[in-house]
Amino acid sequence: MQNNNTNNAEPLVRIRGLTFKRGQRAIFDNVDINIQRGKITAIMGPSGCGKTTLLRLIGGQLRPLSGSVQVDGVEVPALSRRALMNLRKRMGMLFQSGALLTDLNVYENVAFPLREHTPLPESAIRDLVLMKLEAVGLRGARGLMAAQLSGGMARRVALARAIALEPMMIMYDEPFAGQDPISMGVLIRLIKSLNEALGITSVIVSHDIHETVSIADYVYILSAGKIVGEGTPADLASTNSQWVRQFMQALADGPVRFHYPAAAIGEDLSL
Amino acid sequence: MKTWFLDRLQNLGQWGLASLERLGRGTLFFIAVVGGIPEILRRGRLIVAQIYAVGALSLVIIVVSGIFVGMVLGLQGYNTLVDFGAAESLGELVALSLVRELGPVVTALLYAGRAGSALTAEIGLMKTTEQLSAMEMMAVDPLHRVIAPRLLAGIISMPLLAAIFSILGVYGGHFVGVTLLGVDDGAYWSQMQASVDWHEDIMNGVIKSFVFGIVVTWIALFEGYDTVPTSEGISLATTRTVVNSSLAVLGLDFVLTALMFNK
Amino acid sequence: MMTNTRTLEIVVGGFIFAGLVALLMLSMKVSNLTDIGGTDGYEIKAKFDNIGGLKVRSPVKMAGVKIGQVSAIDFDNTNYKAVATLKIDRRYDKIPTDTSAKIFTAGLLGEQYVSLEAGGDDHYLKQGGEITLVSNAVVLEQVIGQFLYNKAAGNDKK
């Protein structure tokens, strides 16, 4: 199921005026986001700015306070349970920890969505599972239990599982967090190749600047519920915004202050 | 002074409202899970795996406890009855105590501690490691796939465990009373058989364990599902499971006994 | 953790089997299930002035051996007596028609039962027969009353 890679004006995910609050805190305040088909879009920002929440909103696990979240033309919050379930079969999600089912082994984990949603016979499932595992380079590990895998391997298996039903879009929740350089390299390569070979739209949520920027086609930077910067990596490198510059160059002090607000030090010390 | 009092009152009110809200969520949870049971009945493998985890693995503690409780009943019962020259009624005493009360109740309490806390921890861990979320995103309802089989397993296992507890207790009492203390073997069994009624005593006991099975498993599963997704949260949830289900069992026992054993 | 499926299923089967066996044993050995429906037997009646604590399913014994049980207890409105229907096991079909029936108590606090003492007649009781020689239950209050009355009378005589 190939998605065409041409510059389709209509984005796959269209978010307009999104507002979402947790208690008093506005996680999103009237936010507009476009996720273009067949491209890798990155959502970045400091920790706790609601990046994972965005993925949940797209996937229908959370409902926005106001605003519209459209995936492939359908309004997600308005979907019935059954329609939502059908939509989710066309979306894959890679969780931060892999979220493999711990009582199953690698093979069974990847086979899980196939068993649950398709009436395919065992032989067909076997072939599909092995192909997916081959794509992530773990075909030989199919007998291992989920608990026996390293973090990086678990994520790769989770990726194989996410593409089992050949989705139109994959969402990556902090895929590079806490990874050693080699695993990081492997994952980057996989995300890139999946996007290029299968035309899968990719949404990466991360705060690892270097890795994300190296493969993203378009980047949004979120902070305090608003988009403080967006554009291609090239645009952001030459930006005028102080804020974006501090974030992209990982500067310790800038619009986001180093010092937590406090009285002048002369008053605090007993000198 | 007055504000202190009002503060306490406000806390009480908040606690009451929070508990009510929790109860509501738990009920909705229960209804959603029960809705998934017909679909799950077609997947016997899942249920069998859960019966193993919840029932078969509890056997050891149930067997040991059943035997010991029966033996203690035999001993204490003998000590009291012998003063009335009624030691021959020991069988009746042991059997009725077990079948009507101790079998269902003690089994439920032990089950809550062993299987209940394990269920809560397991589900809580699945929530914390985002497995439940992942399932939702894969368009599989975790309430149907994960929770429903466990509820069914609990409902099936509890009466069986209680029956095993009771029968072992009867034999435990027999060992102490007849073999060790010299109560007449024939009298032990015949007095028992004459006074234990199948409908009134045994069936009522089975009904009790069914009810306990539903309630304890429900509480255990809900606490796990509702837990704060941190390791601290899971530990609090398992404690709550044991405490709440124990209280529920004892409270329900009174209600059921009053309803069933009204002379 | 995925234990061997076959082992798992065997263990679960064993567990359910054990549970059902336990239930069966509770029904058979512990409760009175075997008595319900009752053994095949023939019914005879006995009329008492007072049956005391005799209940349905109370045993009927002869020479200390249980040969049947009380299957029904009714009240005869014409002669104001209690009518106990005794169901006797078919094996014991040689009970003489002049057998007497008494209500005894097993032990001090035990349950009450009907004790039959054989007579000498050549004819035997059959279905629908009646035991006419009957002695009532010992009612504790009457005994105490009797005792106190005798004591008082004895004191008067002095």
Image (cartoon, rainbow, N blue to C red):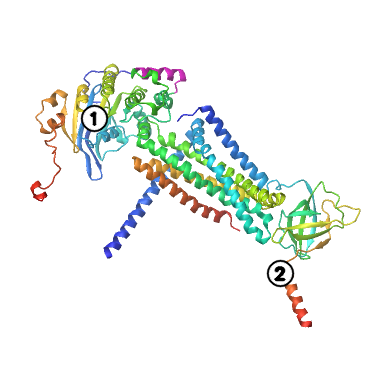
- For disc 1, the chain is A
User: Residue shown at 77%/51% (left/top)?
Assistant: C68
Given contact means CB atoms under 8 Å apart, are the residues at marks 1 and 2 in contact? no
Q: Which mark is residue A215?
A: none
- Using the image, determine if residue A126 lies above or below residue B9: above
Q: Which residue is mark 1?
A: A206
Q: Is residue B97 left or right of residue A164?
A: right
- For disc 1, the neighbor class at 10 Å (few under 14, some 14 to 19, many from 20) is many
Q: Amino acid at mark 2?
A: Glu
Residue A73 lies in what quarter of the image? top left
Q: Was residue B187 drawn as part of the magenta stretch in this picture?
A: no
User: Residue shown at 60%/49% (left/top)?
Assistant: B71
B42 vs B230, nearest the viewer: B230
- For disc 2, the chain is C
| Residue range of the region highlighted in magenta in the rendering | A119-134
- For disc 2, the neighbor class at 10 Å (few under 14, some 14 to 19, many from 20) is few
